[in-house]
Image (cartoon, helix red, strand yellow):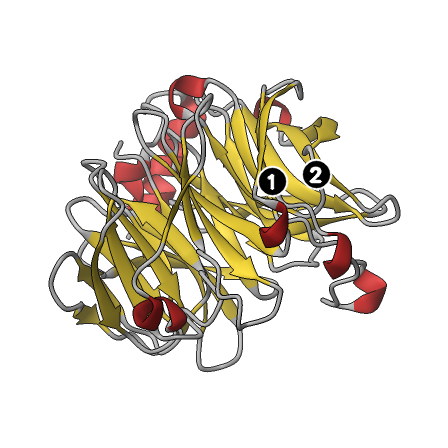
């Protein structure tokens, strides 16, 4: 019997079928990398109820992914300092293209598409120069690399497209690394993390730094709201006794707002935020700490904490369709709001760091 995938592929080849959408891949809500029991790695599409809709093979450990805004296509990125990224057709299950970081570069595990899906932007390390780079890939030409520009700092990790396509926001973590030194941090004394707002052609529009006494607070992960608000999570590289805030909110042209729970609850983060997400209605911010095994939720308007919830090895976090969706290294998938976490499924896998939202369609 002809499979649905083969049937769709035949219709596409003859031009008799509309271009496939994410609905043709089962309408996943988000993507996550995972390791399965045989030791291999996969990229999975998850429903809003935590069900695995599909899994696709990766050649090594993945970190995060980028989901094409309209068609069922995703890029799975290697964990830093990896040099591979694979473009995956989420309907056929095939890897259609391999992106290889140019000589002297490695990926940082994150990327984002332009609003119309014609360009892909990737965070990279020019490790000989000790500088952050954003690679630009032309999706319409088979993901050919067409350029690069400065990230505005060192160690660009996460990158997001600003709402309305008004440029990019980049989390420059400030940490210099070199693949010959593994994951060693080479410049802790001189770190200068920042948020950089950059046009899609590379013009720096605005940069925001933390106070000097927090220069070891590496800005790592981002979430954006529909109104242009940016949330960022940090990982502290200094003396644990200082225990600074690890969450921030920023709107272009305004000052940074730092958020933290009371001293006892804040210390449970253990200096490390793994992922951040804003609720669909823009009222709540959630952050995970796999080191602390907790999720913390904050009210965005007031900055007040809404609760701290325990979940071992939790890291992946998504806005979800109605509530926050989380994943953990134990295999748990669940939801969380103001109440205790609710585990929806526990497949036999170890989820990696991130959940990536997919726009419905």
Instruction: Tell me, yes or no, whether the two marked residues, 1 and 2, touch with CB atoms within 8 Å.
Output: yes
The quadrant where residue 135 appears: top right
x%, y% of residue 138?
A: 63, 25
Measuring 63% from the left and 47% from the top, which residue is drawn there? 212
As measured in the structure, the alpha-carbon distance from the residue carrying label 1 to the one carrying label 2 is 7 Å
Q: Is residue 99 left or right of residue 248?
A: right
Most foreground residue, 347 or 221:
221
x%, y% of residue 43?
A: 45, 58
The quadrant where residue 216 appears: bottom right
Task: Report whether residue 275 is seen.
Answer: yes
How crowded pointer 2 is (Cα within 10 Å; few <14, some 14-19, many 20+) is rated as many
Mark carried by residue 210: none
Q: Is residue 56 above or below residue 230?
A: below
For disc 2, the marked residue is 153
Task: Report whether residue 355 is seen.
Answer: no
Measuring 73% from the left and 31% from the top, which residue is drawn there? 150
Measuring 22% from the left and 38% from the top, which residue is drawn there? 301
């Amino acid at each position: 019997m002809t499979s649905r995938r083969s049937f769709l592929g035949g219709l596409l080849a003859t031009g008799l079928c509309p271009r496939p959408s994410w609905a043709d891949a089962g309408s996943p809500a988000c993507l996550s990398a995972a390791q399965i029991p045989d030791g291999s790695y996969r990229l999975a599409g998850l429903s809003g109820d935590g069900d695995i809709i599909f899994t696709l093979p990766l050649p090594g450990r993945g970190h995060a992914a980028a989901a094409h805004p309209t068609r069922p296509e995703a890029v799975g990125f290697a964990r830093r300092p990896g040099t591979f990224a694979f473009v995956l057709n989420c309907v056929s299950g095939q890897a259609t293209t391999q992106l290889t970081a140019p000589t002297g570069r490695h990926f940082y595990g994150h990327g984002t598409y332009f609003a119309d899906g014609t360009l892909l932007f990737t965070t990279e390390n020019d490790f000989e120069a000790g500088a952050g780079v954003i690679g630009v890939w032309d999706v319409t030409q088979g993901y050919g690399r067409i350029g690069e520009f400065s990230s505005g700092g060192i160690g660009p990790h996460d990158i997001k497209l600003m709402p309305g396509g008004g440029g990019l926001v980049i989390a420059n973590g400030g940490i210099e690394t070199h693949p010959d030194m593994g994951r060693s941090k080479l410049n802790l004394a001189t770190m200068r993390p920042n948020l950089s707002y950059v046009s899609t052609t590379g013009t720096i529009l605005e940069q925001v730094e933390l106070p000097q006494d927090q220069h070891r607070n590496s800005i790592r992960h981002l979430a954006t709201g529909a109104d242009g608000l940016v949330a960022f999570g940090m990982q502290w590289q200094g003396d644990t006794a200082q225990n600074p805030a690890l969450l921030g909110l920023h709107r272009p042209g305004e000052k940074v707002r730092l958020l933290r729970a009371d001293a006892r609850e804040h210390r449970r983060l253990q200096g490390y935020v793994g992922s951040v997400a804003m609720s669909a209605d823009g009222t709540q911010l959630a952050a995970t700490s796999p080191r602390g095994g907790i999720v913390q939720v904050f009210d965005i308007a007031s900055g007040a904490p809404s609760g701290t919830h325990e979940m071992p090895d939790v890291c992946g976090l998504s806005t979800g369709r109605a509530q926050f969706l989380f994943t953990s290294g134990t295999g748990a998938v669940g939801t969380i709001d103001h109440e205790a976490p609710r585990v929806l499924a526990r497949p036999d896998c170890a989820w990696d760091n991130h959940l990536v939202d997919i726009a419905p369609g």
